Amino acid sequence: MNADPADTRYPHLDLADLIAGATGQAIGDRAREHLASCEHCRSEAARWNLVADGVRGLAAAAPETAQPARPRRTGRRVPPGPWRRAVLVAGSAAAALVLLAGVGEVSGLVHVHLSGPGTSGSATSGPGTGTALTAVTGCARLEQADGTLEQVNGAILVIKTASGQRVTVTTTATTFVSTSGALLGDITDGASVMVRGSRSGGAIDAAIVTVGQPFSAVNPPGFVPVRGTVSDVSTAGFTLVTSSGTRIPVTTSGGTLVVVPHASLGQLPAGAAIFAVGHAGPDGTLSARAVAAIRQLPRGNPHLFVRLKNCSPASIGSVLAFGG
Amino acid sequence: MNDPHGDAGAATFTAGPDGDRDDAGLVRRIGQGDEDAMAAFYREHGRVVLAQVLLVAGERAGAEEIVQDTMLAVWRGAASFRGESSVRSWVIAIARRQTRDRLRGRRLRVVGDAFLADQPGSGPGPEATALDRAELAEVMVGIRALAAPHRELLGLVFGSGLSLPEVAGVLEIPVGTVKSRLAAARTALSRILNEKGHDR
């Protein structure tokens, strides 16, 4: 952490933290928490991520080293050949839970239509062939991948698409990771939440509960957000205690969407519906700037939108809206 | 061969987790003449070394020759590797020397510390804005247009898998200087993007 020369009251991440994030190294909990709440640092992190992606993009464009010529000079020993580069293996399997990826009509919009298990996908490429990345409408260099989360291995995710293709998604400490669904279990006593719902007498019938650091983007029209701390959790709901001490009864149901906007990769279980947005990497991989998992689909026919302001990596994840 | 830094006081490295221990084992086997280990070493490090060399040399055929010479130096010098640095920083330091020797005749542009340490402003000025609005492909083109020392530094930090202290060791400069040069490299990149009109 470092002090902002312009305002020493608010410490910002120092360059080492930002570089660690851009290179996929672990950063401390304090730095992570700061990043989640500091727009300045998120922007800085996004800029360094872009620089890092540029370097990695150049490296990916470097010629293969598969068959180097033997050394022209003799040493005491001659290195063997051929030296082959490892090949990313694409797998094949049928998808159990499918995300039908559509394309929004608004520039810079990712639109994912969520469907339940057993639905067949619309992708046409066969298992393990072609690319499973889809261009983000309005953002020439951004790609998306969506499907089912097959595994999490450190900072790497494997997404199996509707067509059975596997996409390797790399993340860094600054990748925006969110998870959502009918996750009432994530609402616990003492949690800081933002509740959006319709008023019912003196209570709120919760449509969306955002857990943790507020995420301004989860703001569909028609709901007034109320922020507070959770108390007295039960199967029927909880009590929201506002900063002024007002206690508001909140009712929840299976249709209540719970959003954890700043989640860790460890909160993304295999089998979750998931989509990722970022830059295409080598061998069909995706260097993700934003990852969103839907661990449990809410009722209805939901759609998920992510608007990318100016298509800038700094803005990815800045807006997330959920509607029917 | 085992001291890529030439400056014992610059930085001290310790072997990292399992990957480094495996690498050290590979180098030990290479030192014993194990050709399979050499092949494995090339698989592990060849592409990263080539990408780094290419970033500095800027020309494919020459870069491949430098990598060949680097691997030859690894083959010859593995027996003297003492494990005082990570294998990755060791091989990259070798590659750096090979690159420097090869390019000596081409007279790389020498850039002074005053230029390299040019600090960017702290606020999101037009240079930050330029980076915010740039696309990846444009950034890649911009990186190619940077001065060789900036390209080299960005490659070491973001492409080689080295930590900042390890980069400092390879470049034989303090970590603080690595940071200031990183900031300067980003500023230079932003200026290049600015020239392409991304500050609007």
Image (tube, rainbow, N blue to C red):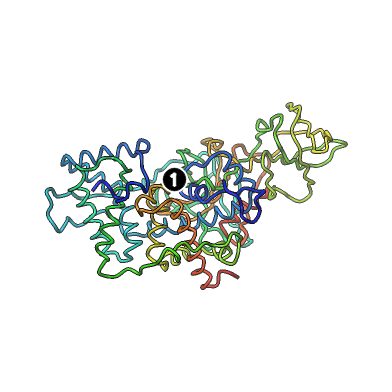
* Total tally of numbered discs in the picture: 1
Q: Measured along the vertical axis of the image, is residue A93 above or below residue A232?
A: below
| x 30%, y 44%: residue | B87
Q: Measured along the vertical axis of the image, is residue A18 above or below residue B126?
A: above
Percent position of residue A16, x then y: 49, 48
Q: Can residue A305 be seen in this view?
A: no
Query: Circle 1 marks a residue in which chain?
Result: A
| x 75%, y 40%: residue | A195
Q: What residue did someone put label 1 on?
A: A166
**Which sits in the foreground, A158 or A9?**
A9
Q: Can residue A49 be seen in this view?
A: yes
Mark 1 element type: strand
Percent position of residue B162, x then y: 39, 48
Which residue of the protein is positioned furthest toward the right in this rendering? A201
**Quarter of image, res A61:** bottom left
Q: Is residue B111 left or right of residue A8?
A: left
Query: Which residue type does callout 1 highlight?
Result: Arg
Q: Is residue B117 left or right of residue A247?
A: left
| x 41%, y 62%: residue | B150
Percent position of residue B192, x then y: 49, 69
Q: In this view, does A307 lie to the left or right of A251?
A: left
Q: In this view, does A207 lie to the left or right of A46?
A: right
**Quarter of image, res B65:** bottom left
**Which sits in the foreground, A187 or B168?**
B168
Q: Measured along the vertical axis of the image, is residue A66 above or below residue A119?
A: below
Percent position of residue A219, x then y: 72, 49
